Image (tube, rainbow, N blue to C red):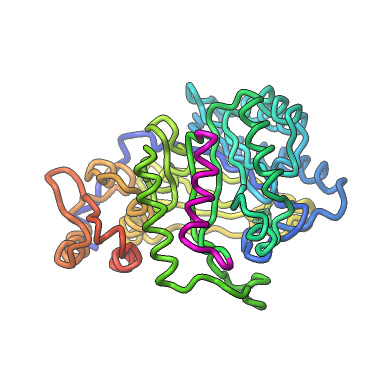
């Protein structure tokens, strides 16, 4: 990496978000490689929340007064938290951090764990966006991936989220489910669109190592050609229905409905993570990037004193490549200004990689931005590999 391309001092504030990990679920889905565990004793929730509050207090010592642009309760199944607990956590956050006007505060919820009262209470606690793990509206498919809910509960969950007054919500749906045809995939999307969701996450079922499905592969998984056809048909359908794809798996009805929390990750913003296994990334004034992560096992986490399991300073030369690896997921022109602001490097620092990508037809270089071509979007892994 040529050091002429380094900008010595950071001139702007990099946006900061907060992620709160809740590791418990009612059962473990066989495809899930998240840090999630079956809740065997309800008492574990209260002691976990106590630890979260201490973890938060420790983070606040270093970042007191910093402005948060979003907060995200992810999991696991954070809708197993009581509204009182959510209130307590948000109040504690507000004592140490300032909230950006119109801050986005998301809570992930699963059908079967919420009702109208609970949703209203979450809203009262300060949650203003719900992300619902629907995955499919087809009972046979839900059974095949061993979700705890059925289609009826999925429909009811969306109803209660809307009835509680949430205008900003996401529906998570999967494709590539066992036995799924193109028509099945489109039927799921249509069922979701009947609720006019402001945001959809539509992602492929993948078999990850160390999951139950990796040990016992489900039968009738669509082969790669079929997956491609389902994906193309689904993307065309969503586009015709007025949803804009702004990331590999994310679709929104309008620019206000993008998930700002996730966009911050993809734009190489900073984030704090509290909870078991949560990761943080902080950029110093001299542009050095520190990552650290919390103890992953929730039982060990609740007995820990400082919660930190590991940390690293990202090698300076890796920063521009890390930025590209994240930002290329976004389906929007990538400005040279943002690259410079977030990495501390001029765009010339990745000139060789950009030229290779351009020669392969994966990107186009405009005067002020990088534009991923259709070919680049279709072969994103090839594009990302150039920056590995
Ligand atoms: S509900 Fe979500 S986090 Fe929990 S096991 Fe299933 S996929 Fe994983």
Quarter where residue 272 is shown: top right
Q: Judge whether 131 appears above or below 69 on screen.
A: below
319 and 248: which one is in front? 248
Q: Residue 160: in sight, yes or no? A: yes
Percent across and percent down for residue 166 are 59, 27
Which residue is located at x 52 percent, y 37 percent? Answer: 194
- Could you tell me which residue is drawn at 22 percent across and 50 percent down? 371
User: Where ligand 1 lies, by quadrant?
Assistant: bottom right
Q: From the top left corner, tell me how far across and down residue 329 is, in percent.
A: 36, 53
Q: Considering depth in this image, is 351 or 186 the residue closer to the camera?
A: 186
**Residue segment shown in magenta:** 178-196
Q: Is residue 326 magenta?
A: no
Q: Tell me which residue sits at (43%, 60%) in the image.
A: 230
| Spot occupied by residue 236 in the image (x, y as percentages of width and height) | 35, 50
The residue lying at 64 percent from left, 55 percent from top is: 277
* Residue 357 left/right relative to 12: left
């Amino acid at each position: 990496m040529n050091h002429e391309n380094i900008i010595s001092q950071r001139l702007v504030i990099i946006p900061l978000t907060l992620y709160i990990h809740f590791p418990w679920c009612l059962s473990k889905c066989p495809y899930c490689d998240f840090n999630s565990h079956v809740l065997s004793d309800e008492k574990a929730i209260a002691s976990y929340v106590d630890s979260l509050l201490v973890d938060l207090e420790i983070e606040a010592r270093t970042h007191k007064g910093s402005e948060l642009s979003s907060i995200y309760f992810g999991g696991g199944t954070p809708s197993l938290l009581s509204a009182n607990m959510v209130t307590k956590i948000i109040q504690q956050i507000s004592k140490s951090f300032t909230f950006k006007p119109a801050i986005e505060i998301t809570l992930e919820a699963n059908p079967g764990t919420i009702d109208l009262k609970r949703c209203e209470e979450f809203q009262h606690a300060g949650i203003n966006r719900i992300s619902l793990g629907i995955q499919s509206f087809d009972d046979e498919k839900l059974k095949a991936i061993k979700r705890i809910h059925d289609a009826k509960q999925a429909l009811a969950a969306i109803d209660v989220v809307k009835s509680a007054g949430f205008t900003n919500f996401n529906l998570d749906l999967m494709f590539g489910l066992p036995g799924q045809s193109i028509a099945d995939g489109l039927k799921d999307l249509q069922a979701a669109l009947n609720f006019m969701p402001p945001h959809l996450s539509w992602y492929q079922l993948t078999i990850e190592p160390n999951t139950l499905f990796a040990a016992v592969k489900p039968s009738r998984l669509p082969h790669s050609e079929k997956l491609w056809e389902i994906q193309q048909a689904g993307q065309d359908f969503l586009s015709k229905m007025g949803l804009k794809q702004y990331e590999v798996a994310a679709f929104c009805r309008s620019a206000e409905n993008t998930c700002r929390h996730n966009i911050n990750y993809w734009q190489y913003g900073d984030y704090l993570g509290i909870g078991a296994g949560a990761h943080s990334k902080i950029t110093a004034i001299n542009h050095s990037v520190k990552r650290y992560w919390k103890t992953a096992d929730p039982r060990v986490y609740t007995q820990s004193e400082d919660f930190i399991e590991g940390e690293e300073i990202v090698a300076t030369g890796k920063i521009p490549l890390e930025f590209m690896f994240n930002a290329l997921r976004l389906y929007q022109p990538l400005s040279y200004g943002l690259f410079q602001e977030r990495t501390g490097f001029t765009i010339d620092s990745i000139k060789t990689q950009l030229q290779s990508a351009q020669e392969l037809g994966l990107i186009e270089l405009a005067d002020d931005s990088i534009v991923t071509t259709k070919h680049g979007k279709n072969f994103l892994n090839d594009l990302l590999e150039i920056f590995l």
